[in-house]
Amino acid sequence: MKLNKNLYFGEEAGKKKAKIINQLDKHQLSFGVYVITLASNGKDLLDVLPAFMLYRNHTRDREILGIAVTKEEAFEVCGQIIADVHSKTGAYDVRSFFA
């Protein structure tokens, strides 16, 4: 698991930032916590995953771009990430922006 240096947080996740990151570092199951990563299929922009999925082999090496405590908040964070990428680059190439 890698955390992006410019990690995005949902409003509620931001209030529990240290606790959530500590749980992720210790590989503790974090039910109700969602992480945002680059899309695994190369077609979509982002993936929203329950945090406990990070401990599976196929998702272990993903870079975390954002953290949220509900699925709705995760979608809001995705929107914020995409809006920031677009405002800074004029495009929606999230993968290149975070490369």
Image (spheres, grey):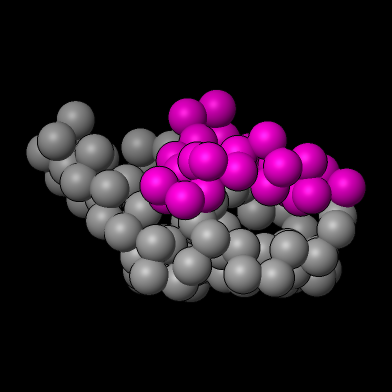
Residue 46 within the segment the image draws in magenta: no
Q: Write the residue at 73% across / 63% down.
A: 30
Asked whether the viewer can see residue 2, the reply is no
Please tell me whether residue 28 is drawn above or below residue 83 in the rendered image: below
Residue 13 within the segment the image draws in magenta: yes
Query: Would residue 30 be found to the left or right of residue 72 on screen?
Result: right
Q: Write the residue at 47% across / 51% down.
A: 12
Query: Would residue 33 be found to the left or right of residue 76 on screen?
Result: right
Query: Would residue 2 be found to the left or right of residue 98 on screen?
Result: right
Residue 51 placement (x, y as % from top left): 67, 64
Residue 32, image quadrant? bottom right
Q: Write the residue at 45% across / 71% down.
A: 71
Q: Relative to the observer, which residue lies in front, 1 or 11?
A: 11
Q: Write the residue at 14% across / 36% down.
A: 87
Query: Would residue 89 be found to the left or right of residue 59 on screen?
Result: left
Please tell me whether residue 73 is drawn above or below residue 6 in the rendered image: below
Counting the numbered discs, the total is 0
Residue 75, image quadrant? bottom left
Asked whether the viewer can see residue 87, the reply is yes
Q: Which residues are magenta?
A: 1-26
Residue 68 placement (x, y as % from top left): 50, 56
Residue 26 placement (x, y as % from top left): 88, 47
Please tell me whether residue 70 is drawn above or below residue 2 in the rendered image: below
